[in-house]
Image (cartoon, rainbow, N blue to C red):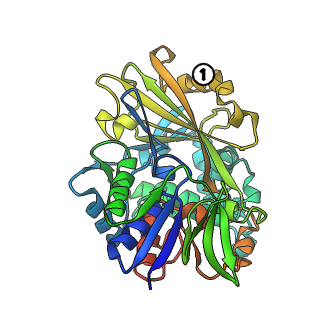
C-alpha cells in the first residue's frame, strides 16, 4: 500500500529526511511544507546586489563519518574546505577562539590570578541546579562574572540562574566546535593553554552561492525522485483521528492528508500552550565598498554595552561572496519578538553602527547598504522546566518531532542531518549534543 508522508519545514533536517525517503522510494509519496518562498530555514542565504549573506556563520563540520559521507554525496565536487578563524572580543581586543595561551596572557592580571585561585574552590555536583551553578562549578566564579554572566543575559535575554544546566552542554561546548579541544572545565582549559594542541578545524562550504546551495541541491534531488515541495505554505497544526495523525492543516484551512508527519517547524506552533520559548534574531546584512581589517570568519561579543552578540565576515568563508574589492558584515542581535526593536529594527541603526566602529569592525563611510532580516525561532530557550515539558508529551501515532525547532534541540546542522539519516534508515538517534 502506498504511503503519504508530510514533512513540515524545508530546513536542513526536513530536506535531508525528504531526500533520503524519496531516494529510497518504497511507494512513499513525500510532501514538504515550507512557509518561506525559499528552502534552508536557518540555513538560508540572502542575495542583494551580488552580495551573499548567510544567516550567521553557517558551515559544515562533523565528526560523524556517515554525516560527512552524506555531505560530500550531496555537494559532490562543488565544495571547498576552509580552516576555522574564529575570535572572541574581550577587554577591547580580538582574541583567538578557542583561547590560546598568548590570548590569555594578555588578560588583566587580576582576572588570571582569581581564575587560578578558582581551581582550588570547586563546587560539589549536588549544588548544581542551573546554568550559573554549572559554569561556576566548572570554570569558577571569576570567569562566570567576567564573561559568561553578561554574555548569557545579552544573548538569551534571561539570567543564568533561570537557564537549565543543559544550556551549558549545548552552548559552551557548541561554541568550541572541535571535540579535540578540551574546555569542559577550568582545569582542562588551563591544561589546554599550557599544553596547546592545534585546533585546525576544517569546514566544508559550497563553492558557489551561500550555505543554501546545499539545500538547493537537496531540493533538486527530491523533485527528481518524485517528491513534492510546497513553498509559501504555512502549517498551522495537525489533524488526528482516534489517536493517530491523519494530516497537516495549513493556515488557509487546507488539509494535506498524511499517514506520517515529521514536524521540524517550531514545536510552539504545534503546541502553542506548551510554554516552549525560542530566541529570535535580528540579522543586519551590511555591504561595504572597501575591504575592512576583519581577519575572522566569526567573532563573539560578550560586552553588554555592545548591541550585537556575533559578527560574521562572509569574505573569509569564500572571496566571491562579495564583489571584487568590496566587503560585508553580518551582525546578529537577539530580541523578544514582541519588542519595538523587532517591529522597527532600524531604530537601533545609530547604536549598531557606533558599536561596529567602536570595535573597529567597519568604517561607516564605506557602507553601500544595510539590510535587516527578522529570523524567528533561531534557538530554543532551555528554562528550568523545559525537560519536564518534554517528558509530558504524548504524541499521536504517526507524528515525529524533528530538527532544532521541532525537537526543541539546541544543535548544529550536522546533528540535524545525523538525526534525519538515522530516521530514514529506521535507526535510533541519541539527541545529546556532545555525544553525537
Q: Is residue 293 above or below residue 138?
A: above
Above or below, comparing residue 404 to residue 290 in the picture? below
Q: Could you tell me which residue is drawn at 73 percent across and 64 percent down?
A: 130
Determine the residue positioned at 67% across, 64% down. Answer: 237
| In front of the other: 381 or 337 | 337
- Please name whichever residue, 122 or 30, is drawn nearer the observer in this view of the structure: 30
Q: Position of residue 113 (x, y in %)?
A: 60, 49
Most foreground residue, 413 or 356: 413
Q: Quadrant of the N terminus?
A: bottom left
Q: Position of residue 274 (x, y in %)?
A: 76, 66
Figure label count: 1
Query: Which quarter of the figure has residue 268?
Result: bottom right
Crowding at dot 1, Cα within 10 Å, few <14 / some 14-19 / many 20+, comes out as some
Q: Is residue 331 above or below residue 190?
A: above
Q: Locate residue 283: give its quadrant.
A: top right
Residue that label 1 marks: 354
Q: Residue at x 28, y 56 (%)?
A: 75
x, y percent for residue 153: 70, 47
Task: Answer whether residue 129 is visible to the viewer in this image.
Answer: yes
x then y, percent, for residue 401: 58, 71
Does the image show residue 96?
no
Q: Nearer the viewer, residue 369 or 262?
A: 262
Element under label 1?
A: helix
Farthest residue to the left: give it: 77
In this picture, is 349 found above or below 113?
Answer: above
Residue that sits furthest to the top in the current view: 365
Q: Is residue 304 left or right of residue 99?
A: right
Q: Is residue 151 left or right of residue 370?
A: right
Amino acid at each position: 500500500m502506498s504511503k503519504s508522508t508530510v514533512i513540515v519545514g524545508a530546513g536542513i533536517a526536513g530536506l535531508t529526511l525528504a531526500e533520503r525517503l524519496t531516494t529510497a522510494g518504497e511507494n512513499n509519496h513525500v510532501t514538504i511544507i515550507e512557509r518561506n518562498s525559499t528552502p534552508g530555514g536557518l540555513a538560508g542565504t540572502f542575495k542583494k546586489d551580488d552580495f551573499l549573506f548567510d544567516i550567521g556563520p553557517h558551515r559544515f563540520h562533523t565528526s560523524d563519518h556517515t554525516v560527512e559521507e552524506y555531505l560530500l554525496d550531496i555537494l559532490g565536487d562543488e565544495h571547498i574546505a576552509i580552516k576555522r578563524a574564529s575570535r572572541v572580543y574581550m577587554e577591547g581586543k580580538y582574541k583567538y577562539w578557542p583561547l590560546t595561551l598568548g590570548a590569555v596572557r594578555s588578560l588583566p592580571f587580576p582576572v588570571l590570578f582569581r581564575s587560578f585561585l578558582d581551581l582550588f574552590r570547586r563546587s560539589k555536583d549536588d549544588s548544581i541546579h542551573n546554568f550559573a551553578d554549572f559554569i561556576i562549578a566548572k570554570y569558577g566564579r571569576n570567569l562566570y562574572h567576567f564573561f559568561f554572566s553578561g554574555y548569557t543575559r545579552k544573548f538569551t535575554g534571561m539570567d543564568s540562574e533561570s537557564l537549565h544546566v543543559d544550556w551549558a552542554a549545548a552552548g559552551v561546548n557548541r561554541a568550541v566546535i572541535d571535540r579535540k579541544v578540551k574546555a569542559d572545565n577550568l582545569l582542562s582549559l588551563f591544561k589546554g593553554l599550557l599544553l596547546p594542541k592545534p585546533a585546525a578545524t576544517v569546514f566544508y562550504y559550497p563553492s558557489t552561492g551561500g550555505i543554501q546551495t546545499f539545500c538547493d541541491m537537496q531540493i533538486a534531488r527530491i523533485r527528481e525522485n518524485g517528491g513534492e515541495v510546497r513553498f509559501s505554505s504555512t502549517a498551522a497544526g495537525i489533524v488526528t483521528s482516534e489517536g493517530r495523525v491523519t494530516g497537516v492543516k495549513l493556515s488557509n484551512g487546507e488539509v494535506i492528508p498524511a499517514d506520517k508527519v515529521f514536524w521540524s517547524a517550531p514545536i510552539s506552533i504545534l503546541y502553542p500552550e506548551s510554554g516552549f520559548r525560542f530566541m529570535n534574531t535580528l540579522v543586519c546584512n551590511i555591504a561595504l565598498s572597501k575591504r575592512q581589517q576583519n581577519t575572522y570568519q566569526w567573532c563573539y561579543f560578550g560586552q553588554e554595552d555592545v548591541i550585537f552578540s556575533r559578527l560574521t565576515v562572509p569574505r573569509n568563508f569564500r572571496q566571491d561572496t562579495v564583489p571584487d574589492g568590496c566587503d560585508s558584515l553580518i551582525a546578529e542581535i537577539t530580541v523578544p519578538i514582541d519588542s519595538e526593536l523587532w517591529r522597527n529594527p532600524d531604530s537601533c541603526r545609530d547604536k549598531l553602527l557606533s558599536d561596529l566602529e567602536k570595535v573597529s569592525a567597519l568604517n561607516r563611510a564605506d557602507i553601500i547598504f544595510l539590510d535587516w532580516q527578522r529570523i524567528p525561532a533561531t534557538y530554543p530557550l532551555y528554562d528550568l522546566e523545559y525537560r519536564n515539558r518534554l517528558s509530558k508529551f504524548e504524541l499521536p501515532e504517526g507524528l515525529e518531532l524533528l530538527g532544532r525547532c521541532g525537537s526543541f534541540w539546541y544543535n548544529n546542522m550536522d546533528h540535524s542531518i545525523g538525526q534525519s539519516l538515522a530516521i530514514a534508515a529506521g535507526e535510533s538517534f541519541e539527541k545529546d549534543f556532545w555525544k553525537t
